[in-house]
Amino acid sequence: MNEIEKRLYTKLKEIYPNGEVVSLQNKDVSLYNQIRHYGIENKMKPREVIEKLGFRHARKKKEDDDKIIERFKSELLLLYPDGVVKGLSQRNQVLYQEIHRYTKLQNINKENFLEEIGFGYMRDNKHNETPEEIEQMILSLYPNKQLPVLTEFKNLHTDFVNKLFKAARQEGKTETEFLENMGFTVDVPVYNGIKRRYSIDKACIKKLHQEYQCNATSEFAELLGVTRQYISAIARSTPKRTPKKMWEDAFTETEKQEVMFMIQNRKFTFQEDETIIRIYKHLNSAKQFAVFYKKKDTLKCLFNLPSDIFEELISYRFHELEERDFKIIKEIERRGFSNKDVVRLESTDAELASLLINRLHSGGWSSRKEYVNFLGWDYVDGRTYTYEELKEKVLPYIDEDGYFRMTREDEDYYTLKNLFSRRGFSSTEEWITHLGFKYQRTRNVPTKEKYQERLKSFIVYDNKIYIQSVSNQRFYQLLLFYGQRKGMTLNEVINYLGYERLYKEELPDGYIPYVWQPNNSDYNMREDFQDMLDELVIDETAKELFLQPEDKLYQDLVAFAEAQNKTIFELLKEWGYTLSNQNPFFTDTLTEEQSLQLEHLKSAQGDLETSVTQEQKIKRSKRLVREVKKLYNYRCQICAHDDNGETIPYIIKSDGTHYVEVHHIIQLSEADLIEVGFELDSYENVICVCSHHHRVLHFHNGGYDKLIGGEDGKLYFISKQEDRLKVHHNLHLQLKESLILETS
């Protein structure tokens, strides 16, 4: 049940605990009306609503009908002694509604019913109720003159809504004003436990939201005690006539001073206790404003501002600046800089630097200097040093032979590195020699000692270690490259470092393999990145490093580069690094981790689902696609990944991962042609490919529709023109006769 149904059910249960509903309109008119209106909204009869709520609807007994009819006759005779009923809805609204409901329930015509009980009936559709008649009608409903919230009143008495509206309009009043003028009290809406009662100026709300930078839907809703949807509907509406303006009024002198004080404090918004002031800028005209003012029960909104307020807004540059600009101005002034002074941003002032960076990203400014100049100051980077100052900073690290001796642990290491990097020097050696000193690269810890220390975490017992190739992929690859430089295999490298390698079957029961996590998992500053990148260098001379797009470090570098409007390749080049072209991602045999991945893939058998709309549509298993891509580390199985075959440049997404697709060897549309027992949407019928080779398989020379085994043990796709396309990397496919495959 929804909330309305729950409320109706509770009320019905109180009146009819036995579950049998009889003569509801006589026992609780209000509840009957609510059920009837709910039924109208949902295209149901009152009886159907009652039965939906779990009650049984029973007809009134005949003796009850007789009593009701007798009561109708006696009341009608008092109103119409001549026996002719005319204008009953205006004379006695309650009696009219009761007769209307009774005849509708009995499925008889109202006019025929009146004739049966001895009365004539005369229609009078042209009658317009006078205020006195309206008052009498409401008094028959609410003799104590206390009305509920106007919206609830209208919902309860829908037949009365138009009459009330017409009568109020004739006197130039709102419905609430019309009722109050006759001495009725109307309850006000309660929003979040607080009663609010303000006139709603629809014209003003619409103008603010359509012509000004106004997003105060929630604020207006809370203020006026209505829903946000109601305010949004006003903003989007196209009224048939111009709504009455209710908030446009001149400011008093006190109100004007409050607005002036707010402008002088450079604020677009002010809120304190029961006072709210908002300044809105026009969407198209820079020097046009609106001011919304609320204090206690006073609501005002001015679009034509007094000249002194307008001049003050221009004087304080409200037409040029935004709220965040004023915040930055105040931060600069708080540091003691007066207007037109030279602003020098020190490296330790991270708060102001962050504000400036965020503003540059969101605006069209090309540099901090340009933006700060626009605000009214000259800007100088506090980290700017003269040539002589830089040389003085380097001198303490020059030995007696003229060599630069500095480690990462030294206090000024990263400061100097960044200072020279901003001046265009891509390496330490370049700026050291530029200053006239000698440079020789030194490592804080020799690579051998560093790897020996790391391998301690992989010890199973004694000096025997177990290292996984996938779970510890980055460190595993670093060991491989380290061995390549020394002409060693991986096992020889491990022995060289003083350890022996164990394999999975040699592990003790219950042993949980260690997974290596690099230090500095979060990279916030440039020096943090460079520190990590130095560990990944595989060629000291060319500063070539190995880094996979799937690594977190790679993805963080992508984000860091995008924040500076650069690609990761431009950033690495600027820092003096190059990415390795080696791609040791594929093996001829499955590793332990790949075997486990293949088991996941086999479990991802996707049943073919079909849903019929205008045509048959096939839903593919998303899990299957995901597992295939993982197995091949997001690399194409057809690309050679070396110089001996066709290799298409990688498509690298913004998150650093490679873009690949999954191709069905036999198309899903051919399901009817395949023998029973073979599932097309399975790991046995898919291959991981780049977008180029995906289109080749579908369209080149009519498409490749066969897969055969070659004499070299590899798999080949065959086109309709007998062209061959080699599958260079295969960890899961096997030839099957059921796939209509051929073997050479």
Image: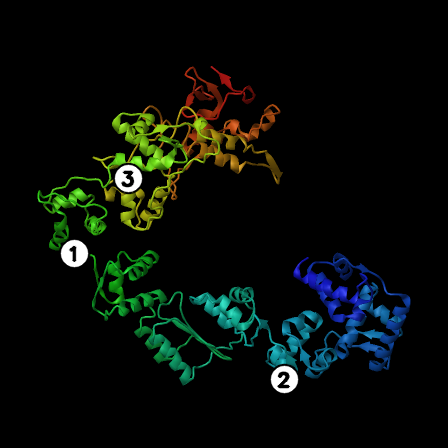
Report whether residue 242 is seen.
Answer: no
- Per the model, the C-alpha gap separating discs 1 and 3 is 30 Å
> Which circle's residue, 1 or 3, is located before the other in the chain?
1
Q: Amino acid at mark 2?
A: Asn
Residue at 49% x, 79% y: name it.
296
Categorize mark 3 by other alpha carbons within 10 Å: few (<14), some (14-19), many (20+).
Answer: few
Callouts 3 and 2 close, C-beta under 8 Å: no
Taking 437 as reference, is 494 above or below it? above
Q: Which residue is mark 1?
A: 385
Q: Which residue is mark 2?
A: 181
* Residue 366 image point, x, y percent: 27, 56
Taking 102 as reference, is 413 above or below it? above
- Per the model, the C-alpha gap separating discs 3 and 2 is 84 Å
Residue at 90% x, 66% y: name it.
62
Taking 207 as reference, is 505 above or below it? above
On screen, residue 620 versus residue 342, left or right, reads right
Q: Secondary structure at mark 3?
A: helix
Q: Amino acid at mark 1?
A: Tyr
Q: Which residue is mark 3?
A: 535
* Residue 506 image point, x, y percent: 44, 27
Depth check: 313 or 685 in front?
685
Quadrant the N terminus occupies: bottom right
Categorize mark 1 by other alpha carbons within 10 Å: few (<14), some (14-19), many (20+).
Answer: few
Residue at 43% x, 67% y: name it.
212
- Per the model, the C-alpha gap separating discs 2 and 1 is 78 Å
Q: Quadrant of residue 150?
A: bottom right
Categorize mark 2 by other alpha carbons within 10 Å: few (<14), some (14-19), many (20+).
Answer: few
Q: Amino acid at mark 3?
A: Glu
